[in-house]
Image: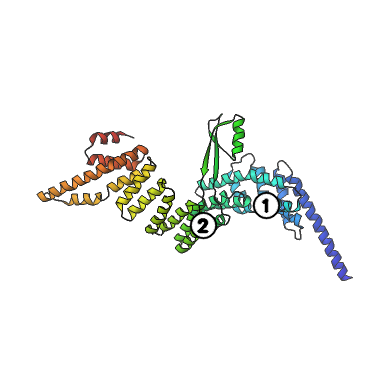
Amino acid sequence: MKIKYVLLASSMMLSAASFAQKDELKTLKKLYAKEKLSVADISEYKSAVNKVSGMSGLAEPDQVYTNFYKAMAPLLELDGVNGSNPGDLQLMAKNLTPAKINELAKGLNGVLEYEKKTGKKVYTDDVNETIMSVKPMIVNYGIVLNQASKFKEAAQIFEAIYNLDPSDASNLYNASILAMQAQDFDGALKYLYELKKINYSGEGTNYYAVNKASGAEETFATDADRKQSIKLGLHEKPRDEKVPSKRGEIYKNIASILVHQGKVEEAKAAINDAKQANPGDTSLLLAEANIYLDAKDYVGYKRVITEVLAKDPNDADLLFNLGVISTTSGDIEEAKKYYKKAIEVNPNYFNAYNNLGALMLQGEDKMVKEMNSLGTTPKDNKRFEELKTKRNKMYSDALPYFEKALQIDPKEPNIKAILLNAYQVLDMDVKYKALKAQK
């Protein structure tokens, strides 16, 4: 009798708990269905969430929807309390922590998976709509954190956005970049390895058109959306912009971190794996070149870059980089050759002109030091004139490159200072006064 009594009591307790669960879930469903929650509604909602979350033995559907209601609490609070002031960053910081966004992701995606499995849609459309509407707000919050130089926190926000909507891996890519800015290399590697795992490229097309009313160029999600808007007479002047593959950048960053950690061979292995998986991706060769550059293996860097140039001889940046490497390795004539090739490809390549001018002046400091050390003997005077002639020739050779650089970027103060000095050395008073008068 005693055993039966205990069993009966247990069943009565389970039954009571079950009724309590159903009551709390009904309350949550009713409150969630409201267009706008008051402060009192939010308090009741949170209380019901706490009660049902603390209950054990929930059936699968009850557990799924409990997780959903709990995950939605911060958003509902943000919408209810902050509806009149959507820019309240303090409240956003409280409600949009990475942990809460990850819980939101788990709750929302849990509903999508469960309702797909059962074939019974209750909240599927609402969840998809919520993800689409809340993502821009969270992205903006991540951007605000980035602008405040809170790179690690911003990285965690973008990772959480990716967990919320795994179909958009660009947010995970953003997280990796921000983590690197924060020098959180372990975090960055975690994001980068996930990008590698899903073989993310980021390659695509941006669709632009000019808004007739505002005159501003705007972006469209698809070409079809843009065509529809142009057909309606709202936009004009369409243009496309190709977005190149980011695979090379991803593997380059993985390799750079590994090199920074002293794992050069591991970095090379990572690039080799990537090249085998994506044999036609030139950006991976650039990533490989970067490993050699980081490791100060200039011979290896030059070998890989030459291979890339064989495939794309009109890449001005690669030609410029070869000029830099040749300078570093002491091959000045080779460096000049690459800088001039870069200018042939891009006649407005500021850095190439600047570096060419600097190469023409290489050794000037040593020359000036010797000139200042000379005395007034006939022999010293003769040597002084020899050095002066050589120095003037150096400035005459450098002058066209620095003048072109200033023409490209008139606001560059260093170039202006170099030119003022050159005009003085070469006794070009008219040009000196004209440049000096410029603001």
The amino acid beneath tag 1 is Asn
Give 81 or 258, whichever is nearer the viewer.
Answer: 258
Mark 2 or mark 1: which is in front? Answer: 2
Q: CA distance from mark 2 to mark 1?
A: 31 Å
- Give the vertical position of 401 relative to 367 (above or below): above
In which quadrant of the rendered view does residue 88 lie? top right
Q: Residue at x 60, y 33 (%)?
A: 229
Is 37 rendered above or below residue 268? above
Q: Residue 54: x percent and y percent?
A: 73, 58
* Mark 1 secondary-structure assignment: helix
- Residue where numbered disc 2 is placed: 274
Is residue 98 toward the left or the right of residue 310 in the image?
right
Residue 323 seen anywhere in this rendered image of the structure: yes
Is residue 181 at least partly visible in the picture?
no
Lateral position of residue 12 relative to residue 139, left or right: right
Residue under label 1: 109
Q: Nearer the viewer, residue 101 or 79?
A: 101
Locate the C terminus and report the quarter of the image it occupies. top left
Name the image quarter holding the N terminus.
bottom right
Counting from the top left corner in percent of width and height, residue 297 is at 39, 59
